[in-house]
Amino acid sequence: DVVKAYGDSLSRIAVDDTVSKSLVTSLSSAFEDFTISVDEGNIHIEKSHSKLFDQKFDNFKPASVFATDLNGNQLPEFWVAGWQGKNYRIFSFEYVAGKINTIRFPAIMGRQRLGYAGRDSLFLEKSAIVHSFIFEDDAYSDITSGIRACYYKYGADGSFVLSKTLDLQKEDE
C-alpha cells in the first residue's frame, strides 16, 4: 500500500473506489543502482541495467514491491507481495556477493493466525515490515474482528523477529 501511494513507481494501473482494491499489472522499485520490477508475474532484478534475476511465477498478481536495506548489512533486499490464486505470497531476495539469494519470510503462526480471514497487505513502517490482514471471531482478542498488523524486524543475520502485533478495529465498509 505504501508503494501504491507513489504514482511514479506504478504503471498501467486500473483503480476502482479504493487504493486497497487496486488492480496492478506492473510495479517497480529502486535502491541505489538496483531495480526490481514485476510485470505479469515476472520478477526482474537488475544492477546497473544488468540482469541478475528473472523468474516467472504463474498466476501471480503483485500488490506491492520495494527495494531497501532494512537490516543495515549493506546488502540490498527486494520484497514482492501479491496474490497467487487465492493465496497471499511474499517473495523476498537479498543480493550477496554477486548472487540473488532467497529470504524466507515467516508465515503467520500461533496467536497471530487465530481468526485469519485474508485481504493481506505488506508495507514498511519506519524500519519494520508490516504484514496486515483481516481477522474474524477471535475470542482471545480485545476486539473479536478487525485488522491485525504483525510488525517484523529483519536482523543483519537474516533472522526475523515479531516485534509486536496490533489488533485494530475495522471501519464499516
Image (cartoon, rainbow, N blue to C red):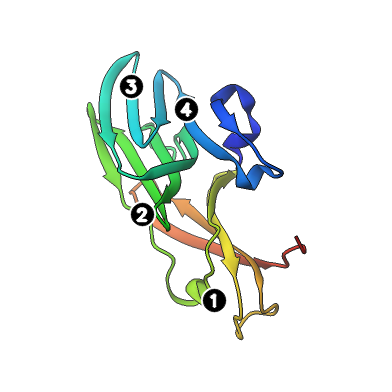
Q: How crowded is mark 1: few (under 14 residues within 10 Å), some or many (20 or more)?
A: some
What residue is shown with label 4? 28
What residue is shown with label 2? 159
| Rendering coords of residue 49 (x, y %) | 34, 13
The mark nearer the N terminus, 4 or 1, is 4
- Estimate the spatial distance between the alpha carbons at disc 1 and disc 3, rounded to whole Å: 39 Å
Q: Residues within 10 Å of mark 2 (few under 14, many from 20)?
A: some
Is disc 1 placed on a helix, strand or loop? loop
| Rendering coords of residue 171 (x, y %) | 76, 62
The mark nearer the N terminus, 4 or 3, is 4
Q: In this view, does 48 lie above or below 40?
A: above
- Estimate the spatial distance between the alpha carbons at disc 2 and disc 1, rounded to whole Å: 26 Å
Is disc 3 placed on a helix, strand or loop? strand
Disc sitting over residue 26 in the figure: none
Closest to the camera, between mark 2 and mark 1, is 1
The mark nearer the N terminus, 1 or 3, is 3
- Estimate the spatial distance between the alpha carbons at disc 4 and disc 3, rounded to whole Å: 11 Å
Query: Toward the viewer: 91 or 32?
Result: 91
The mark nearer the N terminus, 3 or 2, is 3
Question: Identity of the amino acid at label 3?
Answer: Glu
Q: Which residue is drawn at 46% across and 33% down?
A: 68
- Estimate the spatial distance between the alpha carbons at disc 3 and disc 2, rounded to whole Å: 25 Å
Disc sitting over residue 46 in the figure: 3
Q: Is residue 88 above or below residue 143?
A: above
| Rendering coords of residue 98 (x, y %) | 22, 26
Whether residue 8 sits left or right of residue 158 in the image: it is: right
| Rendering coords of residue 168 (x, y %) | 69, 66
Disc sitting over residue 115 in the figure: 1
